Structure formats: C-alpha cells, structure tokens
Amino acid sequence: MNLLTLLDMAASGLPDRVALGRRTTGTTYSGLLGRARSGAAVLRERNAEELVYLGSNGPAFPVALFAAAWAGVSFVPLNYRLSEEKLLALLAKHPKALVITNGAPPAGQDAISTADWLAGTEEQAQETAPWSDDPDAVAVLLYTSGTGAEPKAAILRHRHLVSYLLGGVEFAGAGEHDAALVSVPPYHIAGIANVLSNVYAGRRLVYLESFSADGWLDCVRAEEITNALVVPTMLARITEQLGDAADADVPTLRSLAYGGAKMPVPVLERAIRLFPGVGFVNAYGLTETSSTIAVLGPEDHRAALQGDPLARSRLNSVGRVLPDIEVRVSDADGAVLSAGQVGEVYVRGPQVSGEYRGAGSVRDADGWFATRDRGWVDEDGYLFIEGRADDTIIRGGENIAPAEIEDVLLEHDAVAEAVVVGVPDERWGYDIAAAVVLRSGHLIEVDELREWVRSRLRSSKTPSLIVFRDELPQTATGKVLRRLVRDDLAGAASPGHRQ
Amino acid sequence: MTDVKVGMRLFSSVGAEVVVVRVPSSPVELSCGGRPMTTESAATDPGDEQEPNTGIQLGKRYVDAESGIELLCTKSGPGELAADGRPLTVKAAHALPASD
C-alpha cells in the first residue's frame, strides 16, 4: 500500500483520461505513471536517498511525488521563497537528496532543473524495479509552516496518506470533464493532498504557477475548471478583484474549498454571493494529520446564506470531522470536556501521524494527537477552532482567544485584516494589542475601532493598543506570523510609543 | 493462509488483485471464486469468460463485518471475495464533499 498504488489504479481504470495539464495536450494517467517510472529510474541512477522539491507549482511536482514513491525515497518539498540562509540550513539536513529546483543548483548538492526533470521523465524507462508495498515507509517529510520558531519535519508514511484518501475520496468518482485548479503552494500539505485526491478521483490537475486574482479567474474560465482550493488570502483577493461585479462569471466551477488559515466571515459571505452556483467547502487539517480532518460542506454554507442563525454561526466552525477521525476536547489537566466547553483539541485516526523527524511520535499512549489548537465542539458535532493554544492571551487571569476579537474587528467595513496578540503589561501580566490593515480608501480613528469592539464584546476584551499597518507578516497560506506581530506591538506598546 | 498485514497484496487465481486495508480480528481464509487468494501472482488468463459487472471491481472496498477485514481492489477480476466462506460486501463510499 503505497501512494503509487493509487496512481497505478487510476492508470489502469482511466488510462486515457488526461491527468495533468490542458485537456487537449495534457499528460494522461498512463502517461503520468510512465513518468513516475522514468523519474524513479533517474533517482536510482543518481543514488538519491531523498527527493527535495524546490520548484514552483507545476506538473514537475506530481511527477516528482510519484517518482519518489516508486523509488522508495522520501519526498521533501521545501519552500523556495525562504531566505538563502534558511534554505541552506534545511538542505544540510538532506545531504543525499536529489534537488529539483527552478533556481541555481545549491552548492554541494546533486541537483536537476525543473525543465530537465520534466524532459528526463518524458523518455520511457525500459525497466524499473517494482515499488515496495511497505505501508510504513516514509512517503513525505514536510516542514510545518513554521509560525513557531524552529521548523519541524513532520513524517507522513504511506499508510497515513493512503488512509486519508480511502476515507474521503471515491476512486474514479470524478466526471470525465472535471478539472481541478491547483494554486496552493507545493511545500504545503494542501499541495500534496490536492495531487493525491484528484488523481485518485480521476480529476484533471491544472497548475497556476503563481497566484494572482485575475490570473486565477482567467484560468478557471479558460480551462473550464470545476474544482478549486484556495487559502483565505487568495479568496479575499479574488473578491476584491471582482469588486462590484454581479457574479464571478465562472460557469463551470462547482466546488470551491478553502483552508490553511482562518477565513474571515465577511470575506466568505462576499464570496458566497459572488459565486452563486458554487458549493463552498471549509477544510480543516494539519500537516501532521495528512491534511483534512474536518469539513464544513456546501449545504451548511447555503443554509447560512439563507439567514438561518445557527447555520450562520457555524460559518465560524470547521464543520464535522471525517468518518474515520475521532475528536476530543480536553482541559489543561487532560479531563475530557463536554459539548460547548473550550479546551485543547485532540484527534485520532489512521491518517494522523503526529510524528516528527528526530523527535518520534508525540501521540499519547492511546493514539491521541494534540493539535495545539484551542476549540470546542457543539452538540451536533461541529468543531470550532479558536486559534493556537499558544496564542491564548492570559490577561489578569482571564483566558482570551484572539480569534473572537479579530472576528469583531473584521466585521468593521474599514478593516481588511486584523490580528490580536498579548503584549507584556505590568498590571495585567499581558494586555491585548491589535494590528490592523485597513481596506483601501477607508480611514478610521483608533478610538472609534476600540468602541466598536467594546460595544460588541466587553472592556476586558477591548484592545488597549491598536496600530495600523500596511500589511501583516504571514506564511504562504495566509497564517499570520504572530510572533513577529508580538515583537512589533511589544515595541509599539513600550512607554513613549503608545499610539 | 498466513496472517495478513496492512498493505499486503493478494492475488486471485484469475487476475484480480487486492490490497489489505484493515486486518481481521483473527485469521481468516480468503478466497476469490472459491479458490484461495495467494501472496504471489499466479494468474491464469481469465479469457472471455468474464462477464461485465460481475466479479470484483477496481477501486471498490470489500469488507467482512464479522472479522473486520477490509480489502481494496487494485485490479478487477472475476469471482466473489469471501472470508471463511462468507461473501464480502462492498463498503459504501462516504458522500464527502471534495475538500482539496
């Protein structure tokens, strides 16, 4: 049971269907399997023990993923946007890897350009040893998105990723004309899951190499895209681009999934109006859980738009967990909490790895993995995520979730982005501070915004400090780097700088 | 049959292949079309005898409620899968929205 088994099944069940690229000129499933075989031969010739992918989004990525699976080497996608220093530090951990890169080959490392990789896998290798069926072999090493300090390499074994697909995707379930647009970064778990789900479903993959809102819309129209996955910042930019348009004019699009960071509800409501024929899906998952573990489906989104107050409140949730996943909310002492009570979210299931290179498994004896997210589950099983446990602000002994305050700030017309953090304070231990990005053309006074929060929450949840910034530091999937905001605001909060 | 493990590939005598997705609670005798499944491919050509829509189908999952064993068909072929003589049933796919 190897990822390649999934591609092999698609190649045998749908050999002539286009798997990658344009409908008229793209690579078929049997062609993709052939490229994986040739890629495995390249890896064996070069004695590669791992395959590092440093390229951008494109067809070289799925070929590399499956070639690594065939050759039995770990696939290690890295963020090509990292600084040279950080990249070299990560590459040093993979000295015997072949590196696929768009840029200059890193010194001292066996490397191949993306173009040469694609050209080299076009020729059909004559003979390659069969792949191993070992479900425990490491399929992917993925550095977690690193909102914390030191990036950690999560280990995803073949059985984890295969379990995710078997639990959530119907084999060859896609229609002949279905096509998925991939715009999420290749070094993110969503980029891996995107390839695997669509290949197993038999859906054509179309890559958008670098995201722009009009580029995305043009591609959806030109390639007759039916399914797409975006991160919240992408959806925000798409809705901004559409402006006052009546609708997005994307007749083929049926499903728009979003995930990777918390989606501001105002952006989502704008999007639902602009994409009236589209089913929205909120997907929640972590690198360590092999991608999605909970979904809020199209029916939930439609009910919310029709004004059902319960459904509307659930737009703030990540929906219900997948059938093979169990979820539990616990307090700091490990006691299991009941519906409606906020605590730390734990998950368990065959797709949950919870294992890091060098550190081993962090799951407990019963297999539960601490997501480090704070949240709660309602009586119907809808999971609400309030943010990272580490982000909770303890102000005068009261636990305050930044998300609640951020949601209120985002409801204001003038606010495009908002992040709330705790800054050291002599009186309260920590006090609440917010960094806000205004929508273009909007101005607002700090006091007016503070009053907006106070009237909706209460004084103890009103930021003492609000600063305006042109942009917030964030990861590629739109997670705000709170650590940097905290440093920024702690400086702004020091005496003499209070705004 | 020896103990099966998750990921193990099993072959019918007439060309079908399955992969073990979930192991049984206790060892079972797996068969396809009345003949034992093997861990080595020893397929004989099924010829034209295969009728459409019978046999086991690519991508379907087959389960035995009693032992808990679950198999994924990775290559279609004629015959019916059984565990200790009990016919396996197709596991219904979850109706989940596409999330990625």
Image: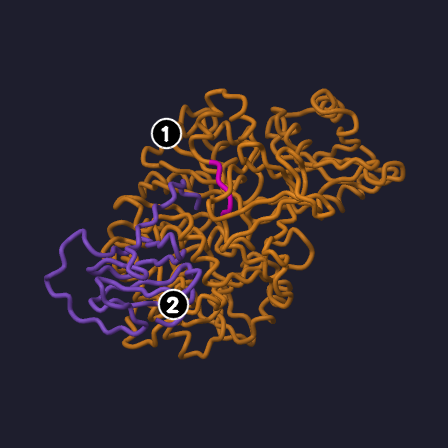
Quarter of the image where one finds residue A309: top right
Which quadrant of the rendered structure holds the N terminus of chain B? bottom left
User: Is residue B23 depicted above or below A349 in this figure?
Assistant: below
Chain under label 1? A
User: Is residue A139 depicted above or below B52 in this figure?
Assistant: below
For image coordinates 56% across by 75% down, the residue present is: A95
Frontmost residue, A11 versus A447: A11
- On the image, numbered disc 2 is attached to which residue? B8
Type of amino acid under label 2? Met
Q: Is residue A62 left or right of residue B37?
A: right
Which label belongs to residue A350?
none
- On the image, numbered disc 1 is attached to which residue? A277
Type of amino acid under label 1? Gly
Q: Do the residues labelled 1 and 2 touch (CB within 8 Å)?
A: no
Frontmost residue, A122 versus A366: A366
User: Is residue A197 depicted above or below A498 in this figure?
Assistant: below
Quarter of the image where one finds residue A354: bottom right
Question: Where are the magenta residues, as a range?
Answer: A292-296
x and y percent of residue A405 in the render?
Answer: 69, 31
